[in-house]
Structures are given as C-alpha cells and as structure tokens.
Image: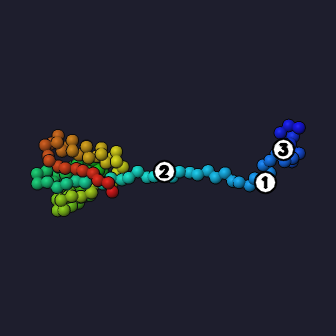
C-alpha cells in the first residue's frame, strides 16, 4: 500500500494522536524614535527672517510662524516640529544652511523626544 492509500483507508500513520498546534509568532515592528526640532533665540537674526524660515521649512502659515517666532523670542527656544531622525536632521541642515547663506547666526538643533 502507498502512503496515499494508507491515508485514504484511515490507517495509522503515526500522527493520529498528535494534537499540537503550530503557532506562528509575529514580530512587531517598533516605531522609530521621534526628534524635536528646536529653534534658538539670538540677538541678531531679524524676526522677519525667523518667520520666513518657519513658513518655508516647516509649512506654517504666517500667523502660526509669527506666534512661534514670538515664543522663540520670549522664551529663548521653541519646538518647531517633531520628525523621524532623518527628516529632523534634514530640517536642521536646511535651516542652518539658509541662515548662513543670509549671514544670520540663527541656531536650529534637534533632540530625542
């Protein structure tokens, strides 16, 4: 008799009493850590330039950018966005390059949330 015939005839193939269940485990993908992008106050960068940076690089409208600029001015620092590491790094570089191009000492940093 072939294996196929044994199965059809219901003959014991040695696995009849096995009731184990195969469980497939799924690994959960961890969310990447987020980073806050911070804008720091200085005594030389014009407020209008800071507003332009916020509109250009962080997609804020004029009213939002103005409010954040005032927070930076009054408190010395403000969070201007929260991003993945690569995006935060890019935003910081863009702001720093833009500020240097226009000879402003504006500082932009990032820190883990």
Q: Is residue 7 left or right of residue 78?
A: right
**Answer yes or no: do the residues labelled 3 and 2 have beta carbons within 8 Å?**
no
Mark 1 secondary-structure assignment: loop
The residue at the point 24 percent across, 50 percent down is 109
- Label 3 environment density (alpha carbons within 10 Å; few <14, some 14–19, many ≥20): few
Q: CA distance from mark 3 to mark 2?
A: 42 Å
What residue would you read off at disc 3?
7
Residue 29, labelled with which disc?
2
Q: Is residue 90 left or right of residue 32?
A: left
Label 3 vs label 2, nearer the camera: 3
Label 2 vs label 1, nearer the camera: 1
Q: What is the residue that sits farthest to the left in this orientation?
A: 44
What residue would you read off at disc 1?
17
Residues 14 and 99: in front is 14
Mark 3 secondary-structure assignment: helix
Which quadrant of the rendered structure holds the C terminus?
bottom left
Q: CA distance from mark 2 to mark 1?
A: 37 Å
The residue at the point 36 percent across, 53 percent down is 34
């Amino acid at each position: 008799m072939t294996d196929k015939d044994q199965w059809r005839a219901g003959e014991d193939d040695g696995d009849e009493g096995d009731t184990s269940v195969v469980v497939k485990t799924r690994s959960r993908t961890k969310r990447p850590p987020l980073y806050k992008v911070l804008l720091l106050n200085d005594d030389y960068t014009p407020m209008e330039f800071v507003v332009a940076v916020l509109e250009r690089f962080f997609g804020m409208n004029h009213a939002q950018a103005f409010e954040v600029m005032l927070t930076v001015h009054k408190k010395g620092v403000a969070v201007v966005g929260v991003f993945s590491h690569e995006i935060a790094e890019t935003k910081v570089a863009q702001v720093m390059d833009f500020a240097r191009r226009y000879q402003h000492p504006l500082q932009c940093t990032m820190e883990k949330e």
